[in-house]
Image (cartoon, grey):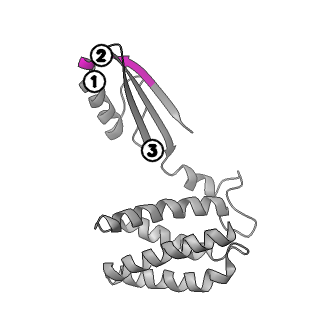
């Protein structure tokens, strides 16, 4: 659920606005200002309109929002106990993007993103009709990825991520 905040200020008030935003990201926000402490996505737009600045802040997708929904009665799980495929794929896309970007910027990916991706990869191959002929090969790549991560072999990890990216493209072309 998105929360929007709009305010018109002068250029002189802009530094104070940024301080207020920083406070809202670290702790309790000022009166009437949105709480940013658990926001997963924050969009900030500042537009100069005849000397007045219109500041627009949009917060969406609060952290743990989907995890809470997974076990609730709103239908976050399938009858076989697996999470909804669409939700799983979104989580995988998010963690894979972080891993892929990190590696291509020569940065070690965050542990949590790697662990989530490996866990979700193992779940993904349990869904029938979503690329079954490629599941065995994908599971092998997941094993190699996990072993490379545990052994801190970033070169092998990077190669495996690239191979998984290629396989993902192939699979999505055939089965999407």
Name the residue at 38% across, 83% down.
Answer: 148
Query: Which residue is denoted by mark 1 in the rendering?
Result: 14
* Residue 42, horizontal then vertical, whole percent: 42, 40
Based on the displayed image, in which of its 4 quarters is residue 78 positioned? bottom right
Q: Earlier in the sequence, mark 2 or mark 3?
A: 2
Q: Earlier in the sequence, mark 1 or mark 3?
A: 1
Instruction: Tell whether position 77 is magenta.
Output: no
Query: Which residue is denoted by mark 3 in the rendering?
Result: 41
Residue 147's tag is none
User: In the image, is residue 53 above or below residue 2?
Assistant: above
- Callout 2: helix, strand or loop? loop
How crowded is the residue under tag 1: few (<14 C-alpha within 10 Å), some, or many (20+)? some
Q: Which residues are magenta?
A: 6-12
Residue 10's tag is 2
Based on the displayed image, in which of its 4 quarters is residue 103 positioned? bottom left
Position of residue 111 in the picture relative to residue 71 (left or right):
left
Based on the displayed image, in which of its 4 quarters is residue 120 positioned? bottom right
Name the residue at 30% across, 64% down.
Answer: 105
Contact (Cβ within 8 Å) of mark 2 with mark 1 = yes
Position of residue 145 in the picture relative to residue 72 (left or right):
left
Instruction: Tell whether position 11 is magenta.
Output: yes
Name the residue at 57% across, 39% down.
Answer: 1
């Amino acid at each position: 659920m998105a929360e929007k905040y709009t305010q018109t200020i002068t250029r002189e008030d802009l530094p104070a606005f940024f301080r207020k935003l920083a406070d809202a990201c670290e702790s309790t926000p000022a009166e009437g200002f949105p709480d940013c402490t658990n926001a997963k996505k924050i969009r900030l737009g500042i537009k100069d309109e005849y000397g007045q600045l219109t500041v627009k802040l949009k917060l969406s997708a609060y952290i743990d929002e989907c995890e809470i929904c997974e076990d609730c009665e709103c239908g976050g799980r399938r009858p076989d106990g697996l999470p909804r495929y669409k939700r799983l794929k979104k989580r995988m896309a998010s963690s894979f993007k972080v891993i892929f970007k990190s590696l291509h910027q020569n940065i070690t990916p965050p542990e949590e993103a790697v662990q989530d991706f490996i866990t979700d990869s193992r779940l993904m191959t349990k869904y029938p009709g979503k690329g079954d002929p490629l599941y065995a090969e994908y599971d092998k790549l997941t094993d190699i990825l996990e072993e490379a991560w545990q052994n801190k072999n970033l070169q092998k990890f990077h190669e495996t991520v690239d191979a998984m990216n290629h396989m993902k493209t192939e699979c999505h072309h055939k089965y999407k």
